[in-house]
Amino acid sequence: MTPADAEAALRAARGARRTLAPFTDADPTLDEQWGYDVQSLDRARRLGSGETVIGAKLGLTSAAKQQRMNVDQPIVGFLTDVMRVEAGSLARTVPGWAQPRIEPEIAFVTAQALSAPLTLDEAARAVDGVCVAAEVIDSRYDGYRFRLPDVVADNTSAAGFLVGPLARPTDLDELARVRCELEVDGHVVHEATGAAILGHPLRALVHLSEHLARRGQTLPAGSLVLAGALTDAVPLLGGSRYTIRMTGLGTLSVGA
Ligand code: OOG
């Protein structure tokens, strides 16, 4: 399966709200680089059709997600302007997805362009603001069954995201101790602390900087970076309300 054929198959399936068998079922030799090649074609095509890249997302940065999805390393995808969903329009957007799930995230707004590998201290200085956020994932693979090359090719299941108000915490070290609760219809279903993300949420930015440096890419200042889910995701069901509380960062509450 060439990257171009895979990109076309993923795009057709997305348009038809269909899911596919993972490509690695038919060809177990596909590797991570193949996945990123497919992702680059997807990104170029979306840019060509008028979308704007506004940031990046990390996936599988928590043990909860890695164990659940059976992929044991972080992955990187891109975010475009059309993926941003306002809380008031989530209910109208849900029917367009095939098997959406929602997960709690910390989002960074970058203060400077990222292109070279950052240390943890440098990552803190590269942050302009922090938001409580939610990511909607909608894997193109039947029942979310995939291997690393498949999920990378599928832009890491990225479908939509919602962000809460911008906060400017004075001490970003505290982000590791932020307590996060995901509530569905008034019941807490998952809890974690910021340390669930690679030991410290800023490590997601370090990981992203290394990813960009390896590929000679730059993410401009003012970009949004989703650091990866702190907990497992939950199905996004029409009629339900999802509330994400994070101590010190605020609350994001949305009805689907
Ligand atoms: C892969 C994407 C995971 C995260 O934040 O961990 C992800 C998936 O679970 O479909 O975005």
Image (cartoon, rainbow, N blue to C red):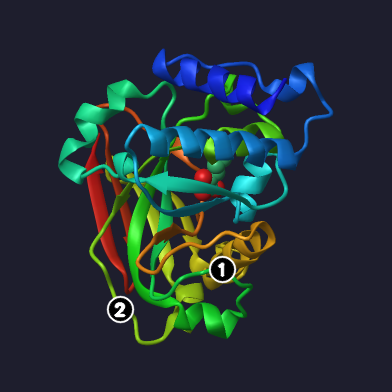
Q: Is residue 153 above or below residue 192?
A: above
Spatial CA distance of label 2 from label 1 is 23 Å
x then y, percent, for residue 228: 51, 54
Helix or strand or loop: what does disc 2 sit on?
A: loop
Q: Is mark 1 within 8 Å of ligand 1?
A: no
Q: Quadrant of ligand 1?
A: top right
Q: Is residue 241 left or right of residue 220?
A: left
Q: Residue at x 75, y 24 (%)?
A: 24
Pick the front one: 79 or 193: 79
Mark 1 highlights which residue?
115
Q: Based on the displayed image, in which of its 4 quarters is residue 144 positioned?
A: top right
x then y, percent, for residue 180: 41, 61
Q: Residue at x 53, y 38 (%)?
A: 155
Residue located farthest toward the right when viewing the structure as drawn = 29
Mark 2 highlights which residue?
168
Say whether residue 235 is visible.
Answer: no
x then y, percent, for residue 239: 23, 28
Helix or strand or loop: what does disc 1 sit on?
A: loop
Q: Residue at x 45, y 21 (%)?
A: 14
Type of amino acid under label 1: Ser
Question: How packed is label 1: few (under 14 Cα within 10 Å), some, or many (20 or more)?
Answer: some
